Amino acid sequence: MKIAHIALYTNDLERARTFYQTYFEGVAGELYHNPKTGLQTYFLSFADGARLELMTRPQLSAAADGVCVGWAHLAFAVGSRENVDALTARLRTDGYVVVSGPRMTGDGYYESCVLDPDGNTVEITA
């Protein structure tokens, strides 16, 4: 068994698509739009076969600030410490919030955490 995809709601579908394409090399499929519900989605595919579904619909509510029950983060493995350092620096330079790292964690990962345009935590690991 494997996870088929992860889905993420956003208030700005194009901004989210651009972020995940630009920094994590996602390849977006065609825009899907359901005129009855207003739902719009993109599926982004990644080199290893993983997929991320970005979704928006009218009248989305904002998530609560801080730590809460639910998904904690989305992690991308970029292959090396040097790649973690480089991507983290690029995101910081481009104005994204770096929450932590790059650093070695207590459980043995070399990682950094950044916030995507909607404030979701994205972990970048070696």
Image (cartoon, rainbow, N blue to C red):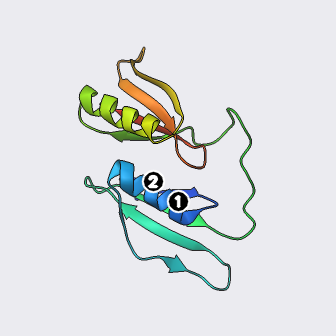
- Assess disc 2: are there few (<14), some (14-19) or many (≥20) residues with their C-alpha within 10 Å of its C-alpha: some
Decide if residue 50 is in sight here.
yes
Residue 12: % across, % down:
60, 62
Is mark 1 in CB contact (under 8 Å) with mark 2? yes
Q: Nearer the viewer, residue 7 or 66?
A: 66
Name the quarter where the C terminus is drawn. Answer: top left
- Left or right? Give the position of 36 relative to 21: right
Q: Which mark is residue 15?
A: 1
Q: Which mark is residue 27?
A: none
Amino acid found under the numbered disc labelled 1: Arg
Residue marked by disc 2: 19
Q: Residue at x 72, y 62 (%)?
A: 60
Residue 74: % across, % down:
47, 43
- Left or right? Give the position of 35 relative to 74: right
Secondary structure type for disc 1: helix
Real-space Cα separation, disc 1 to disc 2, in angstroms: 6 Å
Residue 109: % across, % down:
35, 23
